[in-house]
Every structure is written in structure tokens, then in C-alpha cells.
Image (cartoon, coloured by chain):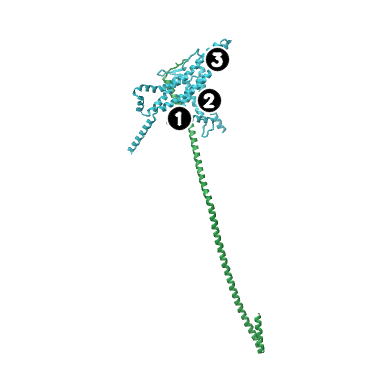
Amino acid sequence: MQTLEIISVNLWQILISLCNLLIMFLIVKKFLYGPVKKVMTARQASIDAGYENAARAEADAEASRAAWEDKLATADATANAIVEKATVQAQHRADKIVAEAEEKADGMIRRAEENIALQEKKAEAAVRREIVDVSALLTEKMLRREIRSEDHRALIDDFIDEMGEN
Amino acid sequence: MTKKNRSFIALDVLLIVLTLLPIVAVLILKVLTNVPSEGISITGARVFFTLPLPLGGLPITESQINSAAVILSLFFLCLYMTHGIAERPNTRRQLLVEWVVEKTESMVSDSMGSFFAGYAPFIAAILALSALSSLMSLFGLYPPTSDINIVAGWAILVFILITYYKLKGGLGNYLKGFTEPIFIMTPLNILGEVATPVSMAFRHYGNVLSGSVIAVLIAAALQGLSSLLLGWLPGVFGEIPFLQIGLPAILSLYFDLFSGCMQAYIFAMLTMLNISGGFPEDEYERRRQKKLLKKQQKTKTND
């Protein structure tokens, strides 16, 4: 079999070798770097997205925590205000009720006194009427009997005594 | 899931087989066509046949076939390494391939600057092609890098790139660079410009070839020594070169493995330094700004 000399320059071989290196470059670029870079870029993107999400979630949590702390701080004050307001209202209402009750009681007492006064008046009128009736009866009786002056006097005295005793 | 798994594994195995197949094929070709030679012979690549072309014809040699085998093998290796890579790495090979990509990219941007960051695949291609070509001698195959034509082709491509980036600073600037520091230096500068690819090619080629030459010489010397010292042994024992056991393997470790990888690294390093070193970045930037300004003025006048 033929062999080349140790140093034998051939233009075609040089050209083919040059093209071979170019082909090798294209192969490495397309089939090694292409897919690997694609995967690495995708991974970098998803990592970035993850960090962004985490940062956003942290910010959200921080914001809601601050809001809750604010609310908690004001809650005591609000509760105190509510209780105070309720107390004042209750006091007010109680006062009102007591005042109303006193007024009512006063009214009732006044009416009762009026009633009593009326009854007294009525009773007086009735007594008077009785006295007149009894006087008339006595007069009748006296007129039917033989009128004697002593008797008469004695009778009326008795009667009046009786009346006074009653 | 299992079906998908099975097809995944099947494709994996297929790709591994296809990666090894070109190397095995050239090995078989070598075994089938090898003619044992008498004595020491240091020759170039063997020629299978010659295509009739102008300029001396194209001999299809071992180096041609071996480099084609290397390229095919590396192509399938790329496919295997990137097979099944996902956003969340779940295979060891993905970690490896990502490490390789990141390492070459950081190496390129460290020594060439960020302007040349896209050169990572090119440098990786040089590294892989050169290293694997040299490592073919581990299998007893003819390493294509010990053929001057192969390495010269790469060096010329690098020279074209160097000149292309030098011309980015403008033709006048490029030509003016030859007359510096003084006018008399022009011939030397031109010589220096041409010397870059030549020295790159010869350094790589010479290192790999010298390894082969030394291996042949050592093997021959050991054979002679062996027959001299152990020739008195009876029968066939006297003809076995016992001293060839061991020492050539250690030498091969240096000349094939270490030197092969070293030369690939040196070639890649020189490529990076020469391309980025010749690039007149300030001048390029200045011209670019000027062009932008001109364009803006043009659009303004059009408005």
C-alpha cells in the first residue's frame, strides 16, 4: 500500500480539513450548545420567576401583617369607645326611666288624694242628708205625739248627743 | 411510563453504539488493510486511493478517514450528551455537559473578552476535534493531527478569522499596522503575520508526529535490546521482545494522552489569543460610533 511522505502538502486535503473544522463547529454549536443553552436559559428564567414570586408573596405578607398590627392596635381603643358609649347610653336611659316612673307615681298620688277629697266631700254630703232625714223623721214623730216642751227638748238633746257620739 | 423509559434507554444505547461505531470501523479497516512492514519505517498516512483532481489530485488517506470518523463520533456523542436534558437536571450526563458548556464559555470570555463570547462552540470544537484526533493513536490508529494538511487547514481557518477581525478596524488601519513601529519593519511584520498560522500548524503537527516517531524508535530499540540480551532463550522465547512490555505503555501515556490533550489546549489557547489579540477594539468602537452618527444624520435629513 502506498503511503504519503511525512511532509506532503496537498491543497485539497487542507481545504477539506478546514471544512471539517467548520462542520465540527456547526455540530457543536447546533447539537451541544444549542440544547444546553436553551435548557439553561429556561431554568434561569424559571428561577428568576420563582424569586420574583417569593419576593411578591413576602411583600404581600408584610403588608397584611402591618395592616393587622394596625387593626390590633386600634381595636382596644375602639372597644373602649364602644363600651363607654354603651354605658353613657344605658345611664341616660336609666335616668329617663326613673324620671318617668317618678312622674307617674306623683300623678297617681295626686289622683288618689283628689279621690279621697272627693269621697270626703261625698260622705259629708251624705251625713248632712241623713241628718236632715232624721230631723224630718223626728219632727214627724214629734208632731204625731202630744207635743210637750220638755219632752221635745229632751228628745232633741238626746238626738244630738247620739249624733255627736256617732 | 415504562414504555417511554424503554424507548429512552433504547435510543441511549443506539447513540452510544453510533458513537463508538466510527472508531471501531476505522480500527477494523486498519486491521484488514495493514501490511506488516519490515524494520523501522516512519511514513505519512497510508493512501487508499487518489481522486483525480487538478492541483495534484486528492489522495484519500488514513488521516481523512480518521478525521471523518472522529467528527461522526463526536456528532453522536453530542446527541447522546444532550439526549433527555431537562430544565431540572435528572441525569449525571446533563451535569457533565452543562459543566463543559459553562467551563468553555467562561474560558473563552476570560481570555477573549465578552465581545467574542460567541466563540465558545468554536473553541470547544477545536478542543474536541484536536484532542480526539490525537488520542486515536491510543488505539494504534493513525492520528490525523500528525498529518500537516489537517492541522494546516485548521490554522488557515484561524488565520482567516484573525485577519477578518483585524480588518474590522478598517483596511487602512490594518495596512498601517504593518509599518509600525518604523517603515523598515514592514517585511518582518508581514513575515510575522504569516508565521502565526504556520507556527501553529507546525507546533501541533510536530508534537504529535514526534510522539509517534519516538514511540517507533523506542519500540525498535527495545526489540534490538531484547534480542541481544534474551536471544539465548530456547526456541520461540528468544524471539519474543519481552523488554517491549511496560515501557512503551508509560511513554504512550505521555506522548499520546498528555501530549495530545496538551496540544489541543495549546492550539485552542493560541487561537483565542491570536483572534482577540489582533482585534483593534478601540478602533472598531470608534468606527462603529461614527457610522451610527452618520446614519442618524441621514435619517434626520430624510425627515
Q: Position of residue A104 (x, y in %)?
A: 57, 67
Q: Which residue shows up at 51% across the image and 25% down it?
A: B19
Q: Chain of mark 3?
A: B
Measured in 3D between alpha carbons, the distance from the residue under mark 2 to the one under mark 3, in whole angstroms, is 36 Å
Left or right? Give the position of B299 relative to A90: left
Q: Report whether mark 2 lies on the same chain as mark 3.
A: yes
Q: Quadrant of residue B196?
A: top left
The residue identified by callout 3 is B243
Q: Chain of mark 1?
A: B
| Mark positioned earlier in the residue sequence (2 or 3) | 2
Q: Chain of mark 2?
A: B
Circle nearer the viewer, 2 or 3 = 3
Dot 3: what SS? helix
Q: Which chain is cyan?
A: B
Q: Colour of chain A?
A: green
| Mark positioned earlier in the residue sequence (3 or 1) | 1
The residue identified by callout 2 is B17
The residue identified by callout 1 is B110
Mark 3 neighbour class, 10 Å CA radius: few under 14, some 14 to 19, many 20 or more: some
Q: Are marks 2 and 3 in contact (CB under 8 Å)?
A: no
Measured in 3D between alpha carbons, the distance from the residue under mark 3 to the one under mark 1, in whole angstroms, is 47 Å
